[in-house]
Image (cartoon, helix red, strand yellow):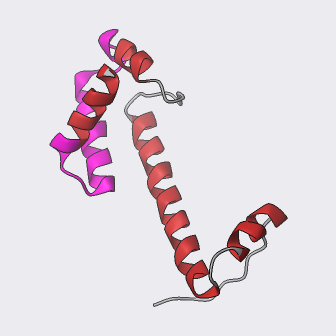
Amino acid sequence: MSRRVTISVPDDVAEQLDKIPARQVSAYVTEALRRRQVADDLRAVLRAAGHGEFPYDPVGSAQRLAARQVTPELREAAIARIAELLDRPTDDVRAELERRAAA
């Protein structure tokens, strides 16, 4: 089921939408909102697991983990929730996070 809604957006956003074929605007906006919801859910899970709002910083993240500012249990719970939100295997998410931390 779908529903028609009317929204107002700033001119710069309207210009971006104008570049998208008219029949694809709804799909584009739907995908953007769904991605935003996943990102918001991930941030909430990370905050609940004891993570602060940090910029992308794999080295700093590894240092905080090494300093035990995040317990292994909280880290595993966050990884499991991230995997669930991304619909990916937990082991794949864990491996990706470890790869990024080592880079």
Q: Where is residue 97? Give x, y as percent.
A: 30, 32
- In the figure, 35 relative to 95: above or below? below
Q: What residue do we see at 34% from left, 9% from top?
A: 67
- In the figure, 5 relative to 33: above or below? below
Q: Quadrant of the C terminus?
A: top left
Q: Where is residue 102? Give x, y as percent.
A: 29, 20
Q: What residue do we see at 31% from left, 38% from top?
A: 78
Left or right of 81 on screen, residue 10: right
Q: Quadrant of the N terminus?
A: bottom left
- In the figure, 73 relative to 84: above or below? above
Q: Nearer the viewer, residue 64 or 18?
A: 18
Q: Is residue 74 visible?
A: no
Q: Which residues are magenta?
A: 65-92
Q: Main secondary structure of the magenta part?
A: helix
Q: What residue do we see at 69% from left, 73% from top?
A: 19
Is 73 inside the magenta-drawn segment? yes
Left or right of 103 on screen, residue 94: left
Q: Where is residue 83? Give x, y as percent.
A: 27, 48
Q: Where is residue 63? Give x, y as percent.
A: 37, 12
- In the figure, 31 relative to 35: above or below? below
Report how many numbered discs are placed on residues in the image: 0
